[in-house]
Amino acid sequence: MSHERNADIELRLLIEAIYLKYSYDFRDYSGASVKRRVAHALRQFELKTISALQERVLHDPSAFMQLLQFLTIPVSEMFRDPSHFLAIRQEVVPVLKTYPSLKIWIAGCSTGEEVYSMAILLREEGLLDRAIIYATDINPSSLEKAKQGIFSMDHIPGYNTNYLKAGGKRQFSDYYTAAYDHAIFDKKLRENVTFADHSLATDSVFSETQLISCRNVLIYFNKKLQDRAFGLFHESLCHRGFLVLGSKETLDFSGYKDQFEPLVKQERIYRKS
């Protein structure tokens, strides 16, 4: 019990030290999730205690950037949960087509799979040219990879399957060029994309938007931070704007539950009331 208590204290000190030194705020992330990620980082750094990890990252910014990769877990896939994207095509796109211009915010964009999925969908629906997509994340390494739009060919068969199930209207291969075991996605897909560092824990709203996609991010937040994020989304969305969440995320227990109404509840698609 004493060892576990010490580890909990060390973890709190590490998270506070990261905030004070680097201004990355993980204090309201799910405790169990952070504990698992730090335990994995300890094994990779070959360190025995969280205190040793804290000393390393405080004195070595490059070590912190390594740790950040564990704390943010940049894992995604294109057209993840295809039925979700199909619902966007069928239920959301007809409304988006009524706007003369669009601003879309993809919060927690990770390495860009969600961004390119949305850009492909918008292009096929004739909306990409009049859209601005804000793709934000707190991990600069993930953002840089997203900007490059280069993904391993190993993942492409799965992405292709997802794309077709999501109502894709062309050949998925139309959107990338294969080279050296990698797929290089068409740069035109990101011409209207602005990639930017933004933290849902510390930053504020930066634009009015018609649609916000924040999928599989909030599951790593505690309720306090989830409500902060929902507040940002509510403030950012225009009247009757759309909020789309991940398959394990919901507004049901949020302080903002009454500020949104479900459009396609099983796909976690909501409209601002």
Image (cartoon, grey):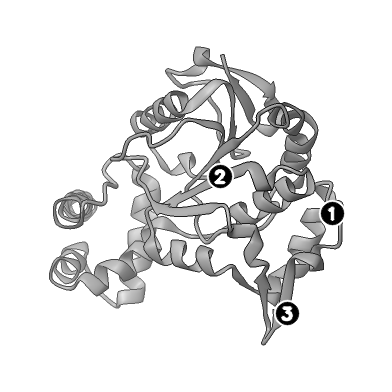
User: What numbered label is drawn on residue 178?
Assistant: 3
Point out the frontmost of discs 2 and 1.
2
Judging from the image, what secondary structure is the residue with disc 2 in? strand
Point out the frontmost of discs 2 and 3.
2
User: What numbered label is drawn on residue 77?
Assistant: none
Point out the frontmost of discs 1 and 3.
3
Q: Is 250 placed left or right of 2 in the picture?
A: right
Label 1 – label 3 distance at C-alpha: 19 Å
How would you rate the neighbour count of disc 1 (Cα within 10 Å): few for under 14, some for 14-19, many for 20 or more? some
Q: Earlier in the sequence, mark 1 or mark 3?
A: 1
Q: Residue at x 62, y 25 (%)?
A: 270
Label 2 – label 3 distance at C-alpha: 27 Å
How would you rate the neighbour count of disc 2 (Cα within 10 Å): few for under 14, some for 14-19, many for 20 or more? many
How would you rate the neighbour count of disc 3 (Cα within 10 Å): few for under 14, some for 14-19, many for 20 or more? some
Q: Which residue in the protein does label 2 denote?
A: 132
Q: Earlier in the sequence, mark 2 or mark 1?
A: 2
Q: Where does residue 146 sit, x and y in percent of width and height?
A: 52, 63
Q: Residue flagged by tag 1: what amino acid is it?
A: Leu
| Residue most extreme to the bottom | 180
Q: Where does residue 233 sit, x and y in percent of width and height?
A: 46, 30
Q: Residue flagged by tag 3: what amino acid is it?
A: Ala
Judging from the image, what secondary structure is the residue with disc 1 in? helix
Judging from the image, what secondary structure is the residue with disc 3 in? strand
Q: Residue at x 15, y 57 (%)?
A: 21
Near-viewer residue (195 or 63): 195
Q: Which residue in the protein does label 1 denote?
A: 164
Label 2 – label 1 distance at C-alpha: 25 Å
Q: Residue at x 50, y 68 (%)?
A: 145
Up-down: is 60 above or below 235?
below
Q: Earlier in the sequence, mark 2 or mark 3?
A: 2
Residues tagged 2 and 3 counted as in contact (Cβ below 8 A): no
Q: Residue flagged by tag 2: what amino acid is it?
A: Ile
